[in-house]
Amino acid sequence: MFTGIVEETGEVAAHDRTAAGARLTVKASLVTGDLRPGDSIAVNGCCLTATAASQVDGLLAFDLLDETLQRTNLKDTRPGSLVNLERALAANARLGGHFVQGHIDCAAPVIAFEKSGADHRLEVALPKEFARYVVYKGSIAVNGVSLTVAELKPESFVICLIPYTLGITNLRALKPGALVNLEFDVLAKYVECILSK
């Protein structure tokens, strides 16, 4: 379980194809402090298991299966790409964002990313099959970042990003057409499941 409060951006050091999918190696500084092999970490919002973690050189390694590559934007990472990193939520920690499972529903393209006063306006395509989970002023995780829906359109949604969020996440590097990982609010999914029975 995560909160969508990104701790740092790591830099992809390597992305190597394997027989089962790919091996992703990320260089980071903060999250490697207490991370051990076997621990869960959200990488662009996707819950992954660290298969290697070194405090000495700051390298983390993850094995990505084809399902992960097909469903997320991690398939597009290359050496030098920035990825958002968040360690799993500790039981005694504050929940600053919202409940984020790290289970990516889909990757959707950015429609627009532009400055709006001191902030930035991010518009992302909203796949029809997931539209029922998105509400105005509701929570959504974009590349693992807990954000609030500022505007809801028939086929897209809009987020307003403050300078702090841009500074600490990889959202600052987005361009129209880039894919972002989306995880919709798990509470909405449970409500739908309960009401359908």
Image: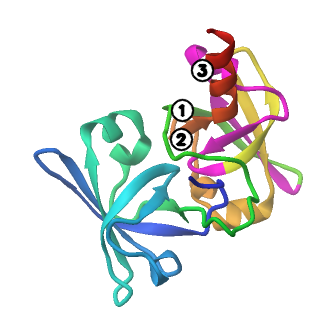
For the residues labelled 1 and 3, the Cα–Cα distance comes to 14 Å
In the image, the segment drawn in magenta is 118-145
Q: Earlier in the sequence, mark 3 or mark 2?
A: 3
Residue at coordinates 42% horizontally, 39% vertically from top-left? 72
Kindly identify the amino acid type of the residue bearing the numbered disc 2.
Val
Q: Is 191 rendered above or below residue 172?
A: above
Q: Badge 2: how crowded within 10 Å, few (<14), some, or many (20+)?
A: many
Give coordinates of residue 65: x percent, y percent: 26, 43
Whether residue 185 is visible, yes or no, is no
Residue 15 drawn above or below residue 142: below
Quick one: 168 or 145, which is closer to the camera?
145
- In the picture of the structure, the residue carrying the numbered disc 1 is 109
Q: What label sits on residue 130 in the rendered view?
A: 3
Residue 78 lies, with reference to residue 136, above or below; the image says below
Give yes or no for contact between labels 2 and 1 (Cβ–Cβ under 8 Å).
yes
The tag on residue 180 is: 2
Residue 39 part of the magenta segment: no
Tell me how far mark 3 sits from mark 2, CA to CA: 15 Å
Write the residue at 52% across / 50% down: 45
Residue drawn at the location 72% of the way across and 60% of the way down: 165
